[in-house]
């Protein structure tokens, strides 16, 4: 909730900075998103309405991209479409999309402002910004503190069951490639500090539009007494059962 409010604040400041909010013509907001982030996009639009922005003020140019082996190229095509459509500003709720947008706008010499949300990577080490003091490019946005988020998650498991020893986590084959790599690395670094062991479940099978593979893997490993399961970035999963 706090992250969403901060993002709206940053976005509106960007509109005002570019003198877009006072224009008589509605300004075009370009959006490239994956279906798993539909809630973020819908929440953003609802937040804009709550701030008083109507169809007379802004219109949305949206591109929905399916997750899959061509994700990176498809995101690139979406960003190039927004540039061709001459949007006034981009809203990108996924840091991979933001990184693609930074690279492409630089390549195409476009100065379209990019407002991003980074939830699974540090935007500095990921290459979206040059520093936290100033992005050094055409981006601005908000980011989650990964270390704090992971530590709170592990503490939550211990609060649910102080006797928890193992946490099952669904990794390769269950998450977007490159989507949760930093989270997984930090998770591996932190679990032992909480007296926990991480057990990773992987699959080489093709992604399913349902949760059948996840549920099958969970059932097969119930006898191992893993009372806690953690699903990372759910690219191929609609929901998870813990």
Image (cartoon, rainbow, N blue to C red):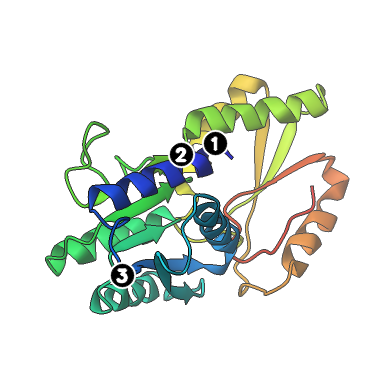
Report whether 218 appears left or right of 135: right
Vertical placement of 46 versus 197: above or below? below
Vertical placement of 186 versus 110: above or below? above
Which is more N-terminal, label 1 or label 3? 1
Task: Using the rendered image of the protein, determine whether residue 127 is visible from the camera's viewpoint.
Answer: no
> Which residue occupies the foreground of this view, 30 or 59?
59
Write down the residue under mark 3. 25
Quarter holding the N terminus is top right
Report whether 94 appears left or right of 82: right
> In the rendering, at what x and y percent does residue 210 appear?
73, 71
Write down the residue under mark 2. 6
> In the rendering, at what x and y percent does residue 53 appear?
46, 58
In the rendered image, the residue lying farthest to the front is 24
What residue is drawn where x is 21% and y is 52%?
138
Task: Using the rendered image of the protein, determine whether residue 124 is visible from the camera's viewpoint.
Answer: yes
Instruction: Give the distance between the C-alpha atoms of the residues marked 3 and 1, in whole angstroms.
Output: 31 Å
Q: Do the residues labelled 1 and 2 touch (CB within 8 Å)?
A: yes
Question: Dot 3: what SS?
Answer: loop
Among the 4 quarters of the image, the one containing residue 131: top left
Question: Dot 2: what SS?
Answer: helix
What residue is drawn where x is 51% and y is 75%?
66
Among the 4 quarters of the image, the one containing residue 60: bottom left
Pair 3/1: label in front: 3
Instruction: Give the distance between the C-alpha atoms of the residues marked 1 and 2, in whole angstroms.
Output: 6 Å
In the rendered image, the residue lying farthest to the right is 223
> In the rendering, at what x and y percent does residue 72 appear?
37, 69
Question: Dot 1: what SS?
Answer: helix
What residue is drawn where x is 30% and y is 61%?
89
> In the rendering, at what x and y percent does residue 34 appear?
51, 67
Write down the residue under mark 1. 2
Instruction: Give the distance between the C-alpha atoms of the residues marked 2 and 3, in whole angstroms.
Output: 26 Å
Mark 1: give few (<14), some (14-19) or many (20+) Cα within 10 Å.
few
């Amino acid at each position: 909730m706090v992250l969403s409010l901060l993002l709206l604040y940053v976005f509106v400041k960007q509109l005002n900075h570019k003198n877009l909010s006072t224009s008589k013509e509605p300004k075009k907001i370009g959006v490239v998103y994956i279906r798993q982030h539909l809630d973020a996009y819908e929440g953003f639009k609802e937040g804009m309405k709550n701030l008083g922005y109507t169809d007379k003020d802004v219109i949305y140019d949206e591109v929905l991209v399916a997750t899959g082996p061509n994700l990176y190229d498809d995101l690139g095509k979406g960003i190039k479409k927004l540039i061709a459509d001459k949007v006034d500003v981009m809203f990108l709720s996924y840091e991979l999309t933001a990184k693609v947008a930074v690279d492409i706008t630089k390549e195409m010499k476009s100065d379209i402002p990019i407002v991003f949300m980074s939830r699974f990577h540090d935007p500095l080490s990921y290459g979206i910004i040059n520093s936290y003091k100033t992005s050094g490019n055409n981006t601005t946005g908000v980011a989650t503190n990964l270390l704090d988020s992971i530590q709170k998650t592990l503490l939550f498991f211990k609060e649910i069951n102080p006797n928890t020893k193992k946490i099952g986590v669904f990794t390769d084959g269950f998450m977007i490639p490159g989507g949760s790599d930093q989270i997984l690395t930090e998770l591996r670094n932190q679990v032992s500090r909480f007296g926990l062991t991480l057990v990773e479940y992987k699959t080489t099978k093709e992604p399913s539009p349902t949760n059948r593979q996840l549920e099958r893997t969970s059932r097969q490993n119930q006898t191992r007494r893993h009372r806690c399961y953690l699903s990372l970035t759910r690219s191929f999963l609609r929901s998870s059962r813990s």
